[in-house]
Amino acid sequence: MLATERLHHEQTFHDRQARERAVWFARRPEAYRFDDDDYLDHETWVRPAFAQLGDVRGLRVLDFGCGHGMAAVVLARRGARVTAFDVSGGYVDEARRRAEAHGVAIGCVQADGQRLPFADAAFDRIWGHAVLHHLDLRRAAPELRRVLQSAGHAVFCEPWGGNPLLNWARRRLPETSRRHTPNEQPLTANDIRSLRLVFPRLEVRGFQLLGMARRFLRTARHRLDWCDEQLLARVPLLQRFCRYVTIRFGFD
């Protein structure tokens, strides 16, 4: 698919979602406000991934594909100098309004993740949640390298495509497939290799092996998470079958 066609599909899909959310926020503007824990604990991988950013006070941090803008607000409240961008103008507006609701300063920009409008080495950290799998990493990875400062690093959380049964469910179950754009695919080992060609240091950690059933077995969430922690620590190869991965990469 041509890059321009991919960009059009992504903008159209996410602008439609943003418009639907804007109608709801117009009736409940107080919903822009949230506690940090609401974001950090909404999935099991978010808090440990965020911890990999380290102390961000005074650092230039890019929220790559900011979506709802919650991560950008958390980063700003921790003292980071935050720039947030998204391909969707509607989501950029939501991120801006959320920042205003919390009284934090965030630079908000509409942009394409494969053609970033930022200077070389502009950021000390880059954060992204569920965005790389929408992109052509052969185009996006060099842009990430260009805007990341040489002593900095990036952390992303992404759906993982190593479990055949889960991939089947993602394609066939209506409650999951309707939330996807035509272009997005869970990351694979080939995508990790594309990132390794650009970044010499890269670490991948899997999350939600048995825990992927927590959506259906809500009362067993804590037990599932405990089982995952034990299994994945003892048998690291099982991480290839997890639902999500966190990826930390940089130059050293």
Image: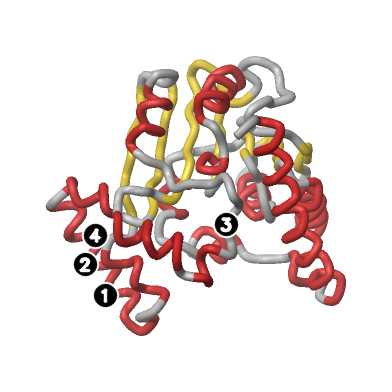
Q: CA distance from mark 4 to mark 3?
A: 29 Å
- What amino acid type is highlighted by mark number 1? Arg
Q: Secondary structure at mark 1?
A: helix
Q: CA distance from mark 1 to mark 3?
A: 29 Å
Q: CA distance from mark 4 to mark 1?
A: 10 Å
Q: Secondary structure at mark 3?
A: loop
Q: Is residue 21 visible?
A: yes
User: N-terminal of the two: label 1 or label 3?
Assistant: 3
User: N-terminal of the two: label 4 or label 3?
Assistant: 3
At 62% from the left and 25% from the top, the residue drawn is: 123
At 61% from the left and 17% from the top, the residue drawn is: 121
> Badge 4 is on which residue?
229
Q: Secondary structure at mark 4?
A: helix
Q: Is residue 104 visible?
A: no
Say whether marks 1 and 2 touch (CB < 8 Å): yes
Outermost left residue: 234
Q: On the image, which quarter does residue 38 sit in? A: bottom right
Q: CA distance from mark 1 to mark 2?
A: 6 Å
> Badge 3 is on which residue?
180
User: N-terminal of the two: label 4 or label 1?
Assistant: 1
Task: Give the quarter of the figure containing the N terminus.
Answer: top right
Say whether marks 2 and 4 touch (CB < 8 Å): yes
- What amino acid type is highlighted by mark number 4? Glu
